[in-house]
Image (spheres, grey):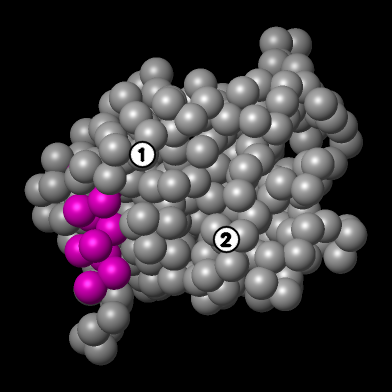
């Protein structure tokens, strides 16, 4: 497997606004995400814990699914396991000014919290925090014969992104079924607590407290079960509530800037916003 990522970042950016014909591959089947994120990166429980310990829990966000056969929460049926809502935990995508695919001008597009808008490089690519899902992409797609984001970019903008489509020999096993519970697919023990959260997630208006509770719940999930460790939950929740990383500070700055009517700034503005908040430098090509 070989991919040409320079100038692309198609798997790190929600680029539907500049290529509306792109297939919405995450919203097929009976279960539909409540959020509108594209290319959501689900994290493993140990990765969630690592982000918490690194002081970067404010980079994380949950995903719930609507499922007509699921558990009713505030009038919305949610995908559930043994009556408890199931969720992923992944990386936030704030609006950033980016120019992917050799664009002629920057656009505000939902972009991974860790992607440098100027170079389109991941700031944690060489870090132990780099998610397994990202490091192996698009290996599993190739192994299963599924279309990759590289190919979608090629179809929309030409270019050569998937240079070698031979699946790598070394791939982690796909977590499926019961073995995924508590490790990648988390459960929320109190459905009634999610009534207001469901509407905020649909509207893209989750609060810091909403996200903190999901992070704590994921970290406290007991692998292979639908229960949580209450002591772990309380400890992690207290930690996450106190978290104020460069990611969180940068997101607040991006949100404030994107709401102004002064046009889209050059991506180089990221040099002031993200490093100024303490972001590490991208590794370079």
Q: Nearer the viewer, residue 22 or 231?
A: 231
Report the span colored magenta: 246-256
Q: Relative to 177, is 211 on the left or the right?
A: left
**Residue 59 spot, x, y in % from top left:** 37, 45
Task: Find out whether residue 250 is within the magenta segment.
Answer: yes
The secondary structure that most of the magenta stretch takes on is: helix
The image quadrant of residue 78 is bottom right
At a point 89% along the width and 59% down the height, the residue shown is 69
At a point 50% along the width and 56% down the height, the residue shown is 13
**Residue 233 spot, x, y in % from top left:** 44, 33
The single residue placed furthest to the top in the displayed view is 170
The image quadrant of residue 121 is top left
The image quadrant of residue 66 is bottom right
Instruction: Quickly name the residue at label 2.
Output: 194
Q: Nearer the viewer, residue 232 or 206?
A: 232
- Give the number of the disc on residue 237: 1
Image position of 101 with respect to 228: above or below:
below
Q: Relative to 23, is 117 on the left or the right?
A: left
């Amino acid at each position: 497997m070989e991919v040409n990522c320079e100038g692309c970042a198609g798997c790190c950016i929600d680029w539907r606004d500049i290529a509306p014909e792109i297939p919405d591959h995450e919203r097929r089947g009976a279960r539909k995400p409540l959020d509108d994120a594209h290319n959501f990166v689900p994290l493993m429980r140990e990765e969630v814990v690592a982000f918490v310990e690194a002081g970067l829990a404010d980079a994380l966000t949950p995903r719930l699914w609507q499922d007509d056969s699921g558990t009713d929460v505030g009038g919305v049926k949610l995908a559930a396991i043994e009556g408890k809502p199931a969720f992923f935990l992944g990386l936030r995508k704030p609006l950033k000014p980016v120019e992917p695919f050799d664009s002629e001008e920057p656009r505000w597009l939902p972009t991974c919290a860790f992607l440098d808008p100027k170079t389109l490089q991941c700031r944690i690519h060489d870090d132990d925090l780099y998610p397994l899902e990202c490091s192996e992409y698009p290996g599993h797609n190739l192994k299963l014969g599924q279309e990759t984001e590289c190919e979608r970019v090629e179809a929309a903008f030409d270019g050569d992104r998937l240079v070698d489509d031979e699946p790598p020999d070394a791939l982690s096993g796909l977590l499926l079924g019961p073995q995924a519970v508590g490790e990648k697919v988390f459960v929320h023990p109190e459905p009634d607590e999610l009534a207001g959260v469901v509407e905020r997630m649909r509207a893209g208006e989750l609060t810091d407290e909403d996200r903190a509770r999901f992070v704590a719940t994921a970290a406290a999930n007991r692998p292979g079960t639908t229960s949580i460790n209450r002591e772990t939950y309380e400890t992690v929740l207290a930690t996450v509530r106190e978290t104020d990383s460069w990611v969180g500070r940068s997101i607040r700055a991006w949100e404030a800037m994107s709401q102004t009517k002064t046009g889209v700034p050059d991506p180089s503005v990221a040099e002031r916003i993200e490093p100024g908040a303490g972001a590490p430098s991208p590794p370079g090509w």
